[in-house]
Amino acid sequence: MKIHESAEDYLERILMLKLKNGMVRSIDIVHDLDYSKPSVSVAMKRLRENGYIEMDADGYITLLPPGQEIASRIYDRHQLLTQFLLQLGVSPENASADACKIEHDISDESYEKIKALTLRQQAASQVSL
């Protein structure tokens, strides 16, 4: 099933907040993304209905395996693409923003080639240290 870019962004943000804070609630997403409570509430409902997340009685969000897989894939892409753009000399702010745009649309083939190049460059720079 094809998942929308906005759902990928929400899942990635849930993962990022979980890594940063240890737990995530909808209000954390509201504050982090500066979205309205109703918008986040609707998104969380859709993610729940599609089996990507679950919420406990206290409102804490857990990524279910399908949501975790998508969130991890998008987060890993974001991290690597940001690193790649930084190596090209792009400013940190633009590198992160552009990586967010690219991470959803880049083909697997192109991503894997960028990944291989980035990892080779990182390994070469560590050897020269």
Image (cartoon, rainbow, N blue to C red):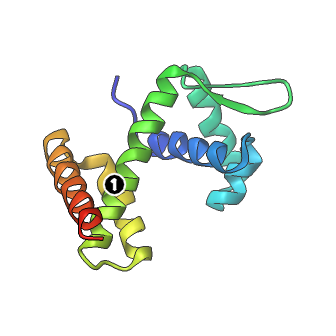
Viewer-side residue, 47 vs 129: 129
Q: Residue at x 23, y 50 (%)?
A: 115
Question: Relative to residue 7, is residue 13 depicted above or below?
Answer: below
Q: Secondary structure at mark 1?
A: helix
- 45 lies left or right of 5: right
Quadrant of the frame with the C terminus: bottom left
Q: What x and y, as percent, mark residue 59?
A: 80, 33
Q: What x and y, as percent, mark residue 9?
A: 48, 47
Viewer-side residue, 5 vs 114: 114
- 105 lies left or right of 67: left
Amino acid type at circle 1 is Leu
The answer, for residue 18, to whether it is visible in the render is yes
Q: What x and y, as percent, mark residue 31?
A: 72, 58
How many C-alpha atoms fall within 10 Å of the one at disc 1: few (<14), some, or many (≥20)?
A: some
- 111 lies left or right of 86: left
In this figure, which residue is indicated by the disc labeled 1?
A: 80
Viewer-side residue, 125 vs 66: 125
Q: Residue at x 69, y 40 (%)?
A: 41
Q: Residue furthest right?
A: 58
Number of callouts: 1
